[in-house]
Amino acid sequence: MFQATRRRLAIWYTAVTAVLLLVFATGFFFYVRNTLIDRIDDTLNHVVEVVERTLVIEPLTSPATKAKTKSQVNIQASFRDSSDAVEDDHIDLEWFSPTGELLWSTLSEPLNIPINANRSGETVWVINNKSQSDQNYSLRQVTQRVEIGRQVLGYLRVSHPWFEVTKPIRQLIFDLILGAGLTLIGVAAVGWLLSGLAIEPVRESYSRLKQFTADASHELRNPIATIQTNVQVALAEPDIEPQQHQQLQVIERLTRRLGRLVDDLLFLARQDSGIVQQQWVDVPLDALLIEVIEEQQTTATAKNLSLSLEIVDSPDTEDKFTVSGDWDQLARLFTNLVSNAVQYTPSGGEIQVELKVAAKKKRNSSAINSALQIKVTDTGTGISPEALPHLFDRFYRADPARTHRSSAGSGLGLAIAKAIVENHGGQIRIDSQVDRGTAVTVTLPAHKSAEISL
C-alpha cells in the first residue's frame, strides 16, 4: 500500500517536472530559432545594402538622338569584387534584369525560382532535377528591387544556405532532449527519495495503529470471555425472572458478537504485522469441507435451505485434494463463505459447494501443476455491480439494511477470507447478479504430490 502511494507521488513529481520542462524547452527552442533567422536576415539585408551602394550605374545613350534618357547597371564593374567578398560568408548573389531575366550569378546552376521582392526574408525549397546528389535543399533569400526614380534597373537577390539554421537547431534539439532526459531521471530519483521521506511518518503511524489494534484486541478477549461466562452462569439459574432472562440473553448475544469482532480484528492485525506463526500441514480439503457443511447444515435446515457438497472426480493421484496450509485458517475461510451464503439466501433457496481439480500444464515439462478450485454458489439476493469492487474492503457492507439484522456481521468476513487465500498463495473471485445469486470461487495450489505426469 505505502509502496504504491510512494510510487504515485514520485510519478506525479516527475510528470509535473516533465510538463514544465516541455514548456520551457519549447519556448527556448522557438526563441533560439527565431534569433538565428533574424541574424541571417540582418546579414542578408546588410549585404543588399552594401552591394546596392557599390553598383556602377551608367547612363544609357539613345543611338538615334544621342540623348541620355535612361540608366543601366554595369554588371562587370559592379559585381567584379562582390563575388569574392560574399564567398567566405556562404552568400550567393543574383542579378536580374527588369524583366526577370538572370544576368549574373555566383551560383553554379540557376535556381529557377520566381522573383519575389521581399526584404523581410523568406525560406525557399530548391529542387534540382539535374544533379544526382543533394537534389533538394533550402535557402534563405532576400530580394531587393533596385530603381532610380521610376525606372527599375533590376533585381538583386541574396541567398544564404538554410543549413546554417538547421544545423545548430538540430544540435539544440539534441541538447534539450539530453538535458531534459537527465533532469527527469534526477527528478524521478529525488522524487522517490522525497516521497519516501513524506510517507515515513504515515507508515510509522500506521504501524503504531496496527500494533495498538492487535494489543487492544488481545486485551479485550479476556474481559469479553469473562462477561460471556458470567452471563451464561446467570442464565443457568432456575429461579431467574423472565424479564431478566431476556435481558441476559441480549447481553450474551451482543457479547458473542463483540467477541467475534475482536477475534477478527486480532487476526487481521496479526496478518498485517506479519507476526502470525504459520503452522503448515497437509490439509485434505474434501474432509475439511465435509466438516464445514455439517456445521452449517443445522442453520441451513432451519431456514429451509438446500446445502450440498459436490466433489468432482479427477484422474487418480495421491492426495489429489490436499493442500499445504493452516487447517484453522482454511476452516475459517470456508466457514465464512458458506455462512454468508446461508445468511443471505432466502428460504427455499439452494447453496452448492463444489470441489474439483483445475490442472495447468507446466511450461517445458510433461507434468501438470494441479490447483484446487472451490466454488460456493447460492441463489440469494445477489450483489450490485457497484458494490463488487469494494467487497474485500474492511467494514464494507454491500447492503446497509443488513446491518440492522441481529445476525449481521462486522464487515470483516470477506477481508479475512481474502487475507487467508493470499496467505496460502491462492486467488479469490466473486461473481454476482442481483436477485439471481452469488458465486465465490477460491483457487488454491495443490500439494506437490498431486502433480500429474503425462
Image: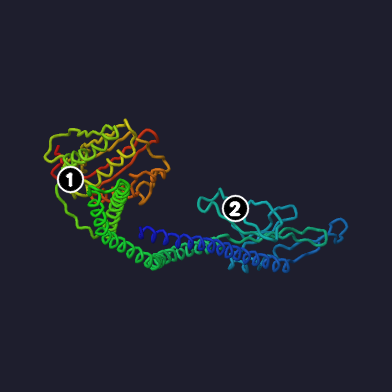
**Which residue was labeled with disc 1?**
323
Q: Within the image, what quadrant is residue 342 found in?
A: top left
Count how many numbered circles sit on residues in the image: 2
**Rendered position, 293 above or below 54:** above
Q: Within the image, what quadrant is residue 83 found in?
A: bottom right
Q: Position of residue 235 (x, y in %)?
A: 25, 49
- Amino acid type, residue under disc 1 in the picture: Val
Cα distance in 3D space between marks 1 and 2? 76 Å
**Rendered position, 437 above or below 77:** above
For the question of whether residue 418 can be seen, the reply is: no
Q: Position of residue 147 (x, y in %)?
A: 78, 61
- Amino acid type, residue under disc 2 in the picture: Trp
> The N terminus appears in which quarter of the rendering?
bottom left
**Rendered position, 311 above or below 138:** above
Graded by Cα atoms within 10 Å as few (under 14), some (14 to 19) or many (20 or more), the crowding at tag 2 reads: few
**Rendered position, 169 above or below 297:** below
